[in-house]
Structures are given as C-alpha cells and as structure tokens.
Image (tube, grey):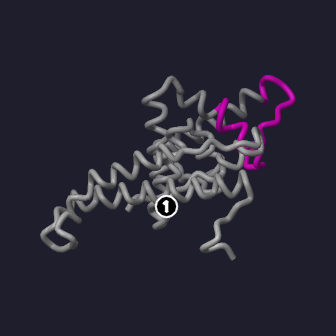
C-alpha cells in the first residue's frame, strides 16, 4: 500500500509532467500563498532581498521533498492537495480516500458552487451512464452467482463501476439536499 505522501507527490509529479505547470510556479505562485494563508510558512518580506530569500528557501525545501531528501510535512497535506490542478486534485483525493477504505465524494466543491450560485446542476444523465457501465461490466454476475470461477479482472472492473455509481448517487443526493432542503422519506432521521 502506498503512503499518503507518496500519493500526493506522485500526483504533483504527474501534474508538472502533463501540464504547463512548472515545479517552481507550483511552489512559489500556488503552494507558497496557501501555506502562508494557513500560517505554515512565513512569506512576509520587507524588501526584495528578503522575498528572494524566502522564495529560495521554499523552492529548495519543496525540491528536497519531491526528491525524498526531506520528509513531507503532513501539516502541509491539505494546502498542498488544494494547490494541485483540478483533475489531479480530485484523483489525489480519490486515492487518499481509497487507502483509508473510503469512497471519495467531492462534497466541498458542491457546497462552494451552491454558495456562489444558489443552484446545483443535476447529473442524472451521468448517473445513468455510470449505471450502464455497471451493466457492461456485469459478466461475473451473468450466471447468478459469484464464485472462484469468476475472473478477478472482471470482478475488479465490476466493483470499480459499482463504486462509481455509489459515489455519483451519493453526490446527487447531497446536491438535492443542499439545494432544496429535501432529505427523502425512507431514511430521514
């Protein structure tokens, strides 16, 4: 099993490799302000020389963290993840949830969107597409049972597709509740 810091650094490397984001830009323009905002580093500077010194110190520290020469500071975990570009941030969160045995449901983005617009977009079409993916992956269930004769690869695909449906269904329920106040009648407490 991968460690949290390995997952975070892996998605950071991938974001730097796949996008126009350089490690310096990520370190100084994206991560540094978030770390300073959380009081985890002092980014204040009275003059250009102090600012350059702060930038060099942070740049060096992040490079050492990325190469494994310095331990990843866990208090930097969430500011660092929140600094990743959207698709990498989501996949990083999904991977971190998975090692904890949890499904990732991006509820924070839903709340931010609602506070901004007071409306949440329904995605029943996405839910139906994911449900169709479950049906296309249902070969292990074709004989009406699961057993040692079922392909592990096909079972893993079915489980992954079921997890996607559960995650989307939960997110849709959260959207409905957030936007309307409705909670359903079957399991409402």
Provide the secondary structure element on which disc 1 rests. loop
**Quarter residue 114 falls in:** top right
Judged from this view, the residue extending furthest toward the front is: 185
- In this view, the residue in front, 45 or 21, is 21
Q: Residue at x 44, y 44 (%)?
A: 10
Image position, residue 160 (x, y; %): 35, 57
Q: In which quarter of the image is the N terminus?
A: bottom left
Image position, residue 25 (x, y; %): 60, 27
Q: Does the magenta stretch include residue 29?
A: yes
In this picture, residue 145 sits left or right of residue 27: left
Q: Considering only vertical position in the picture, is 60 above or below 52?
A: below
Q: Is residue 34 visible?
A: yes
- In this view, the residue in front, 183 or 26, is 183
Q: Which residue lies under the disc numbered 1? A: 103
Q: Which residue is drawn at 35% across and 49% down?
A: 132
Judged from this view, the residue extending furthest toward the left is: 149
Q: Can residue 69 be seen in this view?
A: no
In this picture, residue 120 sits left or right of residue 154: right
Q: Magenta region: which residues?
A: 28-50
- In this view, the residue in front, 124 or 134, is 124
Q: Which residue is drawn at 30% across and 54% down?
A: 135
Judged from this view, the residue extending furthest toward the right is: 46
Image position, residue 101 (x, y; %): 46, 67
**Quarter residue 37 falls in:** top right
């Amino acid at each position: 099993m991968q460690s949290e810091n390995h997952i975070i650094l892996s998605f950071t490397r991938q974001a730097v490799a796949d996008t126009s984001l350089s490690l310096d830009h990520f370190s100084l323009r994206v991560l540094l302000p978030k770390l300073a905002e959380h009081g985890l580093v002092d980014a204040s500077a009275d003059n250009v020389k102090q600012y350059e010194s702060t930038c060099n110190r942070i740049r060096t520290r992040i490079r050492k963290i990325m190469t494994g020469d310095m331990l990843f500071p866990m208090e930097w975990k969430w500011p660092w993840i929140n600094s990743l570009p959207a698709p990498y941030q989501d996949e990083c969160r999904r991977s971190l949830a998975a090692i904890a045995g949890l499904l990732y449901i991006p509820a924070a983005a839903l709340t931010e969107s609602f506070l901004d617009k007071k409306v949440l977009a329904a995605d029943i079409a996405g839910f139906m597409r994911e449900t169709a993916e479950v049906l296309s992956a249902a070969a292990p269930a074709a004989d009406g049972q699961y057993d040692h004769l079922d392909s592990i690869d096909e079972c893993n695909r079915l489980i992954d597709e079921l997890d996607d449906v559960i995650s989307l269904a939960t997110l849709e329920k959260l959207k409905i509740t957030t936007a309307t106040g409705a909670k359903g009648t079957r399991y409402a407490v």
